[in-house]
Image (cartoon, rainbow, N blue to C red):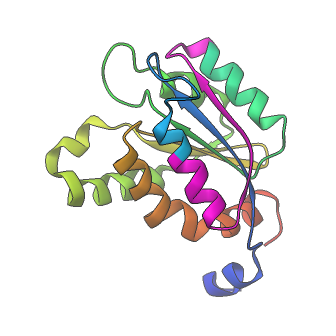
Amino acid sequence: MGTEDHRHNAPAAVAAAVITVSDSRTPRTDDTGRLIRGRLEAAGHRVLDHSVVKDDAAEIAEALLCALDLSPDLVVVNGGTGISPKDVTIEAVRPLLDKEMPAFSVLFAAASHEQIGPAAILSRAMAGVRGRAVVFCLPGSPRACELALDKLILPEAGHLAAHVRGRT
């Protein structure tokens, strides 16, 4: 079975969770989280949860595990993926993953480079699998999240869900 066959047989809609990592945003001021949620819902997907947590590794890990308890197909974490000392999203999420998806990081970096030039090296965006969910860690920038969603995540959402659920 080829990639197109897999896509054709994949679910059209998936369940997702959104987690925003920020010391300054609240649920009311979380424009990036709302953008992600809106893009997912506009594509026909169901958002099970949307939370905002501080730039704290323990809080990030707890939020991810709580989101995973809801059995989403995708979890989109945004924020805390840079290189400043307070950016700990990758350090919090990576140990919880069963598998990493290094191609996502490479493809996102390439697409980001086309958009913002060499500043793309500041991002440590990544993706991986935990159980039967794909977890994406994106920058907190709305523009970066739009890029990742539109170019990589949304076109493959159902296909990814089918693979991690063993339905391919």
Between 61 and 141, the one lying in front of the other is 141
Quarter of the image where one finds residue 97: top right
Which segment did they paint magenta?
A: 35-58
| Relative image position of residue 135 (x, y in whole percent) | 62, 44
Q: Is residue 110 above or below residue 17?
A: below
Between 6 and 115, the one lying in front of the other is 115
Residue at the front extreme, as displayed: 28
In this figure, what is the number of numbered marks?
0
Q: Residue at x 43, y 66 (%)?
A: 151
Q: Is residue 166 above or below residue 2?
A: above
Q: Quadrant for the C terminus, please.
A: bottom right
Q: Residue at x 34, y 29 (%)?
A: 82
Q: Is residue 84 left or right of residue 13?
A: left
Q: Is residue 142 above or below residue 11?
A: above
Q: Is residue 21 left or right of residue 133?
A: left
150 inside magenta stretch: no
Q: Is residue 101 left or right of residue 50?
A: left
Quarter of the image where one finds residue 40: bottom right
49 inside magenta stretch: yes
Q: Is residue 41 above or below residue 168?
A: above
Between 149 and 30, the one lying in front of the other is 30
| Relative image position of residue 129 (x, y in whole percent) | 67, 45
Residue at the left extreme, as displayed: 118
Q: Residue at x 41, y 36 (%)?
A: 140
Q: Is residue 135 left or right of residue 125?
A: right
Q: Residue at x 18, y 42 (%)?
A: 119
Q: Quadrant for the N terminus, please.
A: bottom right
| Relative image position of residue 59 (x, y in whole percent) | 63, 15
